[in-house]
Amino acid sequence: DYYDLVELTETFLSGLVKELFNSHIVKYSALKHGTEEQTEVVMDFTTPFKKIDMLDELTLQTGIELNGSNIESAEALQEMIDFCEKEGIIVEEPKTTARVIDKLVGHFIEPSCINPTFITNHPSIMSPL
C-alpha cells in the first residue's frame, strides 16, 4: 500500500546515503539561483522524511480553499489564476487547473524541499494517466 511504499523509499534512500557517505548528512556546493555565487547546501536523509499535503499547503499559502470537492470548479480555477496574476506568477496558456496548480506548487512548495520530502495527496486532475 501507499504507506509501505513511502517507508520502503525512505529506508532505501536513507540507507544508500549512509552507505555511500557514512552519514545521513550530505553537503554539496550549488550555484545560487540566478547568480554565479556558490552556496553550501546541507541535505539530511534521516528518516522519517518530511511529508507535505499538496492542497492543504496551497490553501495555507494562498488563502484559497482547495479541496477535493472544489478543485475542478471554474470558480476555483479563476481564483487561482487571479492569485497568480496578483503575485506575478506566470502561467502559460492554456491556463488549465493542472497547469495553475503546478505553478503554485513550484512557487510555494518545491523551494522549501531541500531535504527529502514527499508531496502527497496530489489531486487526480494532476495525473497524466
Image (cartoon, helix red, strand yellow):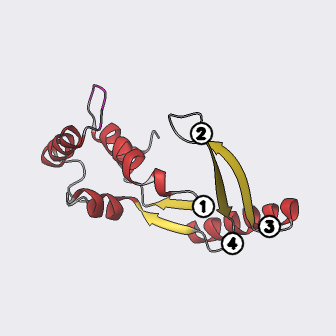
Q: Quadrant of the N terminus?
A: bottom right
Q: Nearer the viewer, mark 2 or mark 4?
A: 2
User: Mark 4 belongs to which amino acid?
Assistant: Thr
Viewed as shown, does residue 13 lie left or right of 80?
right
User: Label 2 is placed on what type of residue?
Assistant: Glu
Mark 1 vs mark 3, CA separation in Å:
15 Å
Given this view, does label 4 or label 3 mark the residue nearer the observer?
4
* Image-based side of 4 in relation to 13, left or right: left
Viewer-closest of 95 and 69: 95
Residue where numbered disc 1 is placed? 115
Residues shaded magenta:
89-94
Q: CA distance from mark 2 to mark 1?
A: 21 Å
Q: Which residue is mark 3?
A: 15
Q: Upstream in the sequence, badge 4 or badge 3?
A: 3
Indicate yes or no whether the magenta region holds residue 1: no
Q: Find numbered disc 4 in the image and state the secondary structure of the residue it sits on.
A: loop
Identify residue for label 4: 46
For marks 3 and 2, the one nearer the N-term is 3
Q: Residue furthest left?
A: 75
Q: What is the distance, in whole Å, between disc 3 and disc 2 at their CAs? A: 32 Å
Q: Which residue is mark 2?
A: 37
Which quadrant would residue 7 be assigned to in this image?
A: bottom right
- Which percent across, then down, holds residue 95? 26, 32
Residue type at mark 1 is Asn
Distance Cα–Cα, label 4 vs label 1? 9 Å
